Image (cartoon, grey):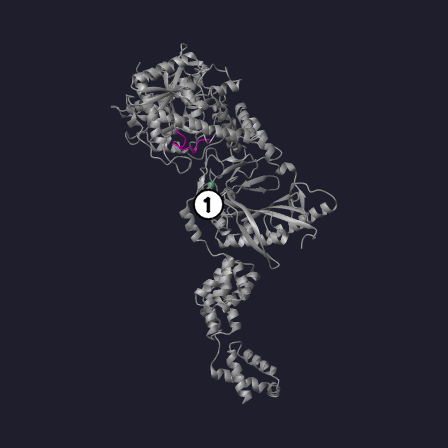
Amino acid sequence: MAARFPSTIAAWRQALEAKPRHNLPSLLANLASAIDRCNPGLNCYIDWDGGEVQKALGGIDPEPRPGAGPLEGVPIGIKDVLNVKDQPCHCASRILEGYISPYDATVVARLRRAGAIPLGRLNMDEFAMGSTNENSAYGPVRNPWNKDHVAGGSSGGAAAAVAAGVAVAALGTDTGGSIRQPAAFCGCVGLKPSYGRVSRYGLTAFASSLDQVGPVTRTVADAATLLQCIAGRDPLDTTSLDVPVPDYTAALGSELGGLKLGLPAEYFADGVDPEVTRAVRAAIDECRRLGAEIIEVQLPHTRYAVATYYIIATAEASANLARFDGVRYGARVAGQDPLDSYQRTRATYFGPEVKRRIILGTYVLSSGYHDAYYLRAQKVRTLIRQDFERVFDQCDALLTPVAPTTAYRLGERIDDPLQMYLGDIFTVTANLAGICGLSVPCGFSTTGLPIGLQILGPALREATILQIGHAYEQATNWSAQHPPHGREAIQS
Amino acid sequence: MNAPVTYKVSIGLETHVQLRTRSKIWCTCPNRFGRPPNTDVCPVCLGYPGTMPVLNAAAVKQTVCAGLLLGCTINYRSKFDRKSYFYPDMPKNYQISQYDQPLCTGGAVTIEVDDQPRTIRIQRIHLEEDVAKNVHFADVSGVDFNRAGTPLMEIVSEPDIESADEAFAYLQALKQMLVYGGITDGNLEEGNIRCDINCSVRPVGQQELGTKTEIKNMNTFKGVHRSLTYEIQRQIDVLQAGGRITQETRRWDDERGVTSAMRSKEYAHDYRYFPEPDLVPVVLEESPLETWRAALPEMPAQRRARFVADLGLPPYDAEVLVADKAVADFFEAALAAGAAPKPASNWVMTELLRALGEKEWTLAEARITPENLARLLQLLEEGQINTPAAKTIFSACFEQGGDPVAIMQAKGLSQVSDEGALTAWVDAAIAAHPKSVADYQGGKPAALQFLMGQVMRASRGKANPPKVLAALKAKLDA
Ligand SMILES: [Zn+2]
């Protein structure tokens, strides 16, 4: 089924360059009315009031110069955790009520430089803590394929909006799978770049040693385009790497000949939904058909990954979130003295999952527990990183499921945080090891929920996983599917 | 001595020194003092969501140079850590500091108390960020974030200091070296140097240190001395009365002159240190380090030695001149402008230091330049002015500035050496005071001084004294 609306970066740019040319205000107005119609059901944008387009148009040329920048005139949805000058940045938390950002995140500045229009605040789990988007102070995001199911998290708003065609593309963030898992749950493409590939300046930190900004798109080619615009050294983030950015689009082709792809045994063990296994196995067969050699590999420390991740991530989060005290910005509850005010403010405005993680992180860093938890987790992290170094000596990339299941039903796991955390098993490892990972659609369950294939590559080898994802995508038609609660189905 | 002979005192100081960099440690905000509240701030130093620190290389260089000056081992690899605690002066509610891998370790400061040289070992020097300043009004409190993010170097001494006097001497010596090194302005009024004190006493003969108390946030050297004098005696009194010292943090009340225990809630923190993930480790290369080492400025001790050996100054002069780097710099600049060492030293030590003391000025506030002083000394040397006139010109230069020659001419202070004028004044004095003439000629040399005074008075100070003396003697001895 051919799309009626420009739902990719490529299509949007074609629409702007076609003769007779569409004009940007009308394209944006159409998109805005699609959001108006879809958002009440999906809740992918926070505080959407339709005025965003007018505001966005205020600062840009309504007659974009085609070819001026790779994203000239293209609206890009922004996850609510990234700072955009003069816009709120709630991080889906009540504690940042009233905060207006005084600056652009580096990725946002780079989007603007490429001609893009940052549009809207995409819903997420509060402070990016969650795997279902049910931890948002602004309500859960619903899955455009089935509104009784979650969109995944924490970039649930980004994935749902892109899948539903109400965002041409989006920037999400991934700390333990927060781009790849919602992309898999919603049937779109999500890329977590290698640690240091993209600047974190302006990304409200959850876990600084794990966070990365990355594209959520409808196609792999769009992910390559977006990464091309945001990647590279940023003097404002000294952990960003001073390594040349290759031409990601040039690497895209249709063949996989000469590539060796590994299947880590630990990612195909018991506990994975058989429908997910079946779809991923079929995708592996497709890659083999495209010329790749498939080998079995081992990542023996995988079973410690979830525990390691939740120690390191919460430890860093406990410090990162300490600044939300109501003194300089955001919501505040008065108290008898500053500390009393802090306690009341944080008790009132942080949600339960955020509190749980701050308490956990404070605990694992406390004197007497620091060595047993935090220090040990750092050692295991090194072992996990070494696992990957070893397998990447044997193969170019790994193929795995993104998540053990398809999207949960709303409320299904919200009261069982441990089960929820275990669902992150296949994604947290890439963050711990600092490598890159791509999620591409690879099928549907019998109930019609999307399934994602994860392609993991060595650090800074985004070109390789984009190449694999693109070839696979071209050979299949999963990305061309449109969900029943998206723009194509709803807008006439 | 501060302590009775039966007790030995051990004091360790943690000295926080604000570095003299152009910008703050993590952002490009200016590093300066005295601006209206919350004007030298940005999203980074206010701890806004999403901001990240970028380490100021000049702060690293200055800390390393301080380490080189104090003879520390420089660690080629060091890192930053987060130190967590909630307080309104902390924008992020954690301070970025260095926990287990500081920039410098080891080193020492040599002090002299009662002519006894002593070596105080340095444990470590690390780099961190200064916090904001809480300001309290009648019914509200405010926070001024201008200071937040000022590069702060913490110098931790071993507990080698044994008296309040030694603590004072240690701080003086440290300040002098750091000011000489161009590392800090050393301005205590602006909070450039602050320190925390650890202090314990133990009976002589006991090996292990006694239980220590901590006195936090001292910002004058005098305060350190006074609080230690009090605290040492308090601890001894407790022990002598059979009591035990409680390990605690105490607050110094400068008005009452006592220390008192703080509530444990105010200081009992679990800082939960962990490596700062927003900064990469600091890796120093050998070659820039060598360049820095080679460019280290002269230290006070070297300068004193040079003043004695090369300029022939008495050790006392050298000591006085070198004590304040600005004064010693002024002195050397005057020499460079042509002044001779000893006269310049005399004038700097007497006239300049006295005038600064009277006005309570720093040298920067005085208008006189080293070139002015050199010119003034030249006029004196050439006999164009006499000493009283020179002092008058000095005062004018000091307060208003200006060329000494121009001032001399404007004030008519040029010395009279003209034979005719001198003869007239001498003759008049002899004629008016026959008794003094008789006294002198009768063997009382003091009478000559009286006559000399009369001539100087008649000339209103302008007569050239050696010439007057010669003329008087010529007339009276004839
Ligand atoms: Zn700043």
Q: Amino acid at mark 1?
A: Val
Q: Which chain is indicated by disc 1?
A: B
Q: Is A176 drawn above or below residue B434 in the view shown? A: above
Magenta stretch containing residue A200, yes or no? yes
Image quarter hosting the N terminus of chain B: bottom right
Which residue sits furthest bottom?
A: B478
Task: List x then y, in percent, for residue A406.
Answer: 43, 15
Most prominent secondary structure in the magenta stretch? loop
Where is residue A339? Give x, y as percent.
Answer: 60, 34
Confirm whether residue A289 shows in the render: yes
Residue A202 lies, with reference to residue A131, above or below; the image says below
Seen from the viewer's position, the closer of residues A229 and B302 is B302
SS of the residue under disc 1: helix
Is residue B366 visible to the viewer in this orientation of the structure? no
Left or right, A6 with reference to A37: left
Report the residue that reaches farthest toward the right.
B241
Q: Position of residue A111 (x, y in %)?
A: 36, 31
- Mark 1, residue position: B60
B280 drawn magenta: no
Farthest left residue in view: A19
> Which residue is located at x 56 percent, y 84 percent?
B429
Q: Which quadrant of the rendered structure holds the C terminus of chain B?
A: bottom right
x, y percentage for residue B253? 65, 47
User: Is residue A298 depicted above or below B183 in this figure?
Assistant: above
The image shows residue B307, relative to residue A426, as above or below, that is: below
Which residue shows up at 51% across the image and 61% down it?
B304
Point out the stretch of residues depicted in magenta: A194-205
Name the one closer to the observer, A342 or A208.
A208
